[in-house]
Amino acid sequence: ESAVSLRNVRKRYDLNEPILALDDVSLDLLRGSYTAVMGPSGSGKSTLMNVVGLLDTPTEGDVVVAGTDVSTLSEDERTDLRGEAVGFVFQTFNLMPRMSALDNVALPMVFAGVSRDDREARARHLLRRVGLGDRLDHRPSELSGGQRQRVAIARALANDPELLLADEPTGNLDSATSADVMALFDDLHAEGNTVLLVTHERAVAEHADRIVHVLDGRVEYVETLVRS
Ligand code: ADP
Ligand code: ADP
């Protein structure tokens, strides 16, 4: 069963000249799959992430997320589905600087209407899960880059999303810290989470089970990785 399904998706931007940022993309992310997207700058990776993550809608084609045909939704319904179904991890962490790690992780649950007690209990559980059980009250500025990214990953998991979407999650981390963060993604995949990550780094992409190579808005080829 697919967590996300794209069928013949096109995304056109009309500025001075029309650009097809996505040109007839069909892609299935099966439940529990682990996929990396690679491609040169301008090839459509961000547009693909934004469409898969319900931040943007295609010009043409079908997008089904968690069994829901997104084209049938109003913008508010799409925002709600995004909050329930997609957990985002960014290169720059995007944590709230004045909030503790615990409050950062609890925040998506505020939008989802979870009670304060349940939010705190789940945020504590998730921070323990990512190895930060002793950093609950620290603000982002009091944490290392790798620790900040682990807070962001815990936050992404807050509403138990159908899909964990990571855009260059190791882009701001040194190689040892990147390896730690990728080991965490590997564990989350092993526990059944569906993971999609965009990266420029081949070594990062090779953590996934397959690499989708994009070029000029198209899926150029899909590479299946076999692990020994
Ligand atoms: P990547 O993430 O691989 O660098 P993008 O998805 O950002 O690629 O961009 C794909 C193409 O779409 C590029 O030609 C880019 O200039 C164009 N594009 C992206 N976003 C917009 C936008 N908001 N308006 C106009 N053109 C855009
Ligand atoms: P903005 O309108 O400024 O983009 P929003 O208020 O839509 O911000 O969302 C702020 C943050 O909360 C975003 O990261 C968004 O993905 C997340 N969010 C929005 N709605 C929900 C929801 N229902 N559940 C969980 N997170 C949500």
Image (spheres, grey):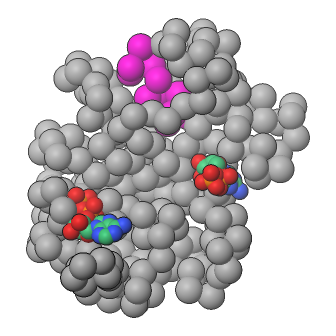
What is the tally of numbered marks visible in this picture?
A: 0
Which residue shows up at 45% across the image and 19% down it? 147
Report the span colored magenta.
144-154
Residue 50 in sight from this viewpoint: yes
Q: Main secondary structure of the magenta part?
A: helix
Quadrant of the snapshot with the C terminus: top left
Position in image of residue 219 (x %, y %): 18, 74
Q: Position of residue 89 (x, y in %)?
A: 45, 43
As drawn, which residue projects farthest toward the front? 16
Q: Quadrant of ligand 1?
A: bottom left
Is residue 31 among the parts visible in the rendering? no
Q: Residue at x 45, y 33 (%)?
A: 93
Residue 29 image position (x, y, % from top left)? 38, 68
Please state if 143 lies on the left or on the right of 28 as rendered.
right
Q: Residue at x 17, y 46 (%)?
A: 200
In the picture provided, is 34 more to the left or to the right than 203?
Answer: right
Residue 109 is drawn in which quadrant? top right
Placement of 18 over or under 155, stated as above or below: below
x and y, in percent, of residue 110 in the image: 78, 43
Quadrant in the rendering for residue 162: bottom right
* Residue at image point 64% right, 30% down: 104
Horizontal side of residue 52 vs 207, given as left or right:
right
Q: Nearer the viewer, residue 214 or 133?
A: 214
Q: In the rendered image, which quarter is residue 50 located in?
A: bottom left
Left or right side of 167 for 174: left
State yes or no: residue 134 in magenta: no
The one of 195 and 25 positioned closer to us in this rendering: 25
